[in-house]
Image (cartoon, rainbow, N blue to C red):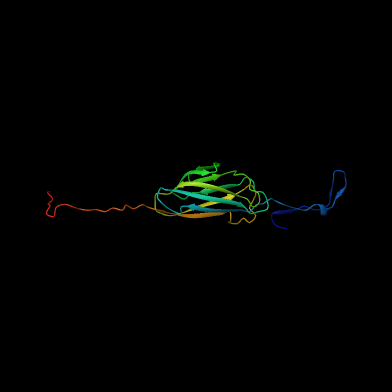
Amino acid sequence: LSSDSVYVGGDFDRADGTDVPSSKVGRWSEPTTDLSLSKSASPVTVYAGEQVVYALTVRNNSGRLATNVSVRDDLPPGFTFVSANPDKCTASGRTIICENLGDLSPGSLGIIHVYATAAQDAGTYRNVAVAGSSQPEIKNGSDNIAAVNVQVKRRSADLALTKSGPAGARVNR
């Protein structure tokens, strides 16, 4: 028996007094799912203040229906939430919660797009998200967590200075 199962057995009597042999009673397991999450960013290199689009794909890898699927996406420091599709996503600071995205049947997937403005400081920024549902995860592993890095660059000015004037020009002070 697995730790997430309860064995129901023994002899039971129906209301009419007839026996129900234990062969008619079996094991009960709590319904579980196996969600996986993948994440990408476009573009992966941006200039400070430009828009980044994160695409999150949640897939139900189990043989059971996953109900009330949700995704939490924590934007990196300095990034600003702009919008998300579907519109079931809300933001509080840098945390985006996409609740009750619906149910995912076995093998099906759902896609979320999160639009954000990149930080003003140059550097590599890691964005992490996690998917879940009303059912516990089968594996309790990390395949329902996804991350992607975005490189933010600062714009540099391309300046040139040209001095011109007559060869014998003098500057008065």
Q: Position of residue 81 (x, y in %)?
A: 47, 45
Between residue 21 and residue 118, name the one nearer to us.
118
Judge from the rendering whether residue 61 lies leftward or rightward of residue 118; answer left or right. Answer: right
Count of picture labels: 0
For this orientation, the residue located farthest to the bottom is 1
Q: Position of residue 12 (x, y in %)?
A: 83, 49
Residue at image x 53%, y 53%? 39
Residue at image x 52%, y 50%? 55
Judge from the rendering whether residue 50 lies leftward or rightward of residue 146; answer left or right. Answer: left
Between residue 84 and residue 21, name the one nearer to us.
84
On the rendered image, what quadrant is the N terminus found in?
bottom right
Q: Position of residue 25 (x, y in %)?
A: 80, 52
Between residue 111 and residue 6, name the one nearer to us.
111
Q: Position of residue 9 (x, y in %)?
A: 79, 53
Residue at image x 54%, y 45%? 97
